[in-house]
Image (tube, rainbow, N blue to C red):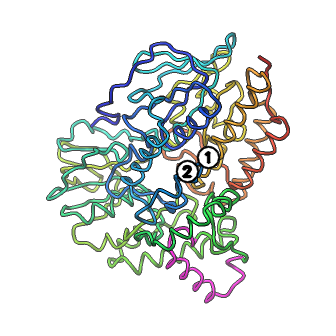
Amino acid sequence: MPLEQEEAVESPITDHAEYDAVVVGAGFAGMYQLYRLRELGLSVRVLETGDGVGGTWYWNRYPGARVDSPSMQYSLSFSSEMEQEWGWPEDYSPQNDLERYANHVADRFNLRDDIQFGTRVTNASYDENTKKWTIETDRGDSLTAQYFITAVGCLSATNMPNFKNLESFQGEWYHTSRYPKEGVELKGKRVGIVGTGSTGIQAITAVGKEDCELFVFQRTPNYSLPSNNKPMDPEFEKEWKTRYAEHREAARVSQGGAEIIAYPSVSALAVSDEERAATYEKAWNQGAFTLAQSFTDLMTNEDANFTAAEFVRNKIRQTVKDPETAELLAPKDYPIFTKRICMDTGYYETFNRPNVHLVDVKANPIEEITPKGIKTSAGEFELDLIIFATGFDAMTGPLFRMNIAGKDGLTLKKKWEDGPKTYLGISSVGFPNMFMITGPGSPSVLSNMTTSIEQHVDWITDTIKYLKENELADIEPTAAAEDAWVEHVNEVANKTLYPKANSWYIGANIPGKPRVFMPYVGGVGNYRQKCDEVAAKGYEGFELTPA
């Protein structure tokens, strides 16, 4: 089954046109960036591969797809009227509600007029003479713009491992990010799901409830915490809407871009075993990421982290009835919270169902895909349908796929061959007037994405306004500022336990990708303050070229 879209709506081909700005991507980031640039009176064209808006929530339609940030916080805050009028049915919204919301945003602000759907960027190059970007697409059109803004998301470049003889499989197969909109009939089928990351855990929980035989192919187990998702409490929603501005401000200055009720004040090792156990139990029952916020040193001290990890492992052992299966599901070779922490609604209970089977492909690796199913070193599993929950070439992958070339023809891929180099995660030396929304070196995937998206879009918009008002043609980081920021990002990451896991945060899921920790661990609030200081000092660390 193809990984790309099968059909795109008809959008007028621009052929060759000039704009003030070209934005790539029509998810929440691209739509909000379009809205803000329109406010400046700029001409803007948004290019979107899909045939609809929503980004992540357009593409990821697999069973169980759901956001892992609270609905009331995973939304755009720029319109207080929209905040008040929109209602979320659940605490953690499923894909269909999030896509519905994205369409509401597009329609409410009449954004579709400036979005070209069914269009993939194939090349983007900077001309030093004209100081303009030229963006080419798979539809043969060529666009010129002063500002080139990527809103492609951190998790949009599908990672499909090179399984031997995949084309020989006689059943159906899909990657989770290209699951059919109309769904797939599962009843009576033998289904295989490959991968047990965040996406896999959601899909496994949903598919396991169906009238089918499910085989879960797990290489590395993941820690998963209960979301305790439920229908939205009207009183809770009313309180949030009454004090939305206060809640939003608290999120903007927080560590993770979401409001936290209470911050920890003590080490996990400074309390008795009984008090620690009670704290973890309370956090587990509250659900979501509360467990990670129980003590001050869970991300900096391995002994403290072990106490939380062992608590979760014991929860798995208590939940999964078969002891052997429970041990396979309990991660033991990396600290908890150092990989993308997962949230679920009954994931571990799924393995108590008679129709669900766990296959350990760490002990018995997948050797090939056969016409009938999946063959591991332990034998062949006959399947009618395979769902690959194998994730993404995170953060850099979506950018590299556009073949971006800056000064002297230097490609972004070449410049970043040893790992991404940015200033603030927004700009990179050699690529003037190119802005990356939630790029490598920013909090991005370690935060509530909508909070970080709005912060980046607002900063980029204010920067462009500054350039216009001061008759400046170009903005580009200095090499010194970029080097200092990269060093800072690495320094902060190395003070934590994050680098101890082979996660997609460091590109470990992609063969040959340099092992560099890509997001910024310093926190959304600290990062926002740094960005504001840079702007307040006349864009310190940037070179500004007069028109």
Q: Quadrant of the C terminus?
A: top right
**Type of residue at label 1?**
Glu
Specify which label sits upstream in the sequence, 2 or 1. 2
Image disc number at residue 454 = 1
476 relative position to 227: left or right = right
Which residue shows up at 31% across the image and 64% down it? 358
120 relative position to 333: left or right = left
Q: Residues within 10 Å of mark 1 (few under 14, many from 20)?
A: many
Q: Which secondary structure type mostly characterizes the magenta part of the structure?
A: helix
Q: In this rendering, is residue 518 above or below 71? A: above
Which residue shows up at 29% across the image and 31% down it? 7
User: Magenta includes 282?
Assistant: yes
Q: Which residues are magenta?
A: 267-291
Q: Quadrant of the N terminus?
A: top left
Q: Residue 14 at what x, y percent from top left?
A: 45, 17
**Type of residue at label 2?**
Leu
Q: Residues within 10 Å of mark 2 (few under 14, many from 20)?
A: many
Q: Is 182 or 358 nearer to us in this picture?
A: 182
* Residue that label 2 marks: 76
Q: In this rendering, is residue 213 above or below 473? A: below
Q: Name the element at disc 2.
A: loop
Q: Are the residues at dot 2 and dot 1 in contact (C-beta closer than 8 Å)?
A: yes
Q: Name the element at disc 1.
A: helix
